Image: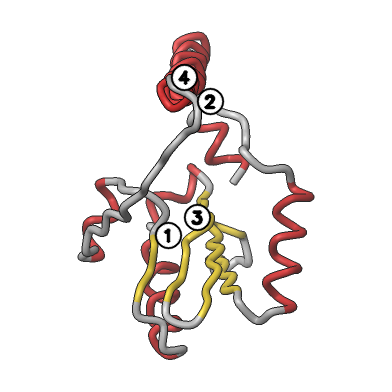
Amino acid sequence: MTDVFNKQFLQPTHTKEDIKNQILALVKADKILLLEAVSSDNIPLASLFIAFDNKIAFGLGTASYKKYQNLYPNEIMWFEAITKLKKRGISMLEFGGRRNYKEKYGPVPYIKPRIIASKYRGVLEIKEFLKKAYYGVREVGAQFKKVSAK
């Protein structure tokens, strides 16, 4: 995952310790699917991290090394993951956001309704503004690092 964030000139959103703790908790509950694509020379190419419960699974992390992406290891892992999840009776898979490359799997869009309320006038607008500002600054920083790296 660190390689994926580095390609985008971003910092990982979770520490290695956070990820380790999440994995251990899900392993104990038998609610995790971890896959790794490995070359015939035993070189790690990519990894996939999916949590599931009853009928739904959530893609929490997919990563591949840039130099091996020409081998399409993510596609192989997603195919294998979908096969394994179906065998467990899981009928829904949340890929973790909408991206063009995910369209090949034939997803059915789902918009979950949300009701958000606040006791104080203006709090929701401020919250939304701060969220957009945070991600905007993050994206500008990543773009600046891309230009600087060239």
Q: Nearer the viewer, mark 4 or mark 3?
A: 4
The residue under the point 53% across, 40% down is: 4
N-terminal-most mark, 1 or 4: 1
Q: How far apart are marks 3 and 2 (CA)?
A: 17 Å
SS under mark 1:
helix
SS under mark 3:
strand
Q: Name the residue under label 1.
A: 74
Q: Distance between the residues labelled 1 and 3?
A: 7 Å
Q: What residue type is labelled 1?
A: Asn
Q: How far apart are marks 4 and 2 (CA)?
A: 27 Å
Q: How far apart are marks 4 and 3 (CA)?
A: 33 Å
Residue 91 position within the rendered picture, expressed as x and y whole percent measured from the top left: 35, 80
Badge 2: residue crowd in 10 Å (few <14, some 14–19, many ≥20): some
Q: Is 29 situated left or right of 96 in this image? A: right
Q: Name the residue under label 4.
A: 126
N-terminal-most mark, 3 or 2: 2
Q: Residue 62 carries which label?
A: 3
The residue under the point 53% across, 55% down is: 61
Q: How far apart are marks 1 and 2 (CA)?
A: 21 Å
Q: Is 149 situated left or right of 31 in this image? A: left
Q: What residue type is labelled 3?
A: Thr
Q: Can residue 85 be seen in this view?
A: yes
SS under mark 2:
loop
Q: Nearer the viewer, mark 1 or mark 4?
A: 4
N-terminal-most mark, 4 or 3: 3
Q: Mark 2 points at which residue?
A: 9
Badge 1: residue crowd in 10 Å (few <14, some 14–19, many ≥20): many
N-terminal-most mark, 1 or 2: 2
Residue 94 position within the rendered picture, expressed as x and y whole percent measured from the top left: 39, 62
The residue under the point 40% across, 22% down is: 125
User: Do the numbered discs 4 and 3 sit on residues whose CB atoms are within 8 Å?
Assistant: no
Snapshot quadrant of residue 96? bottom left
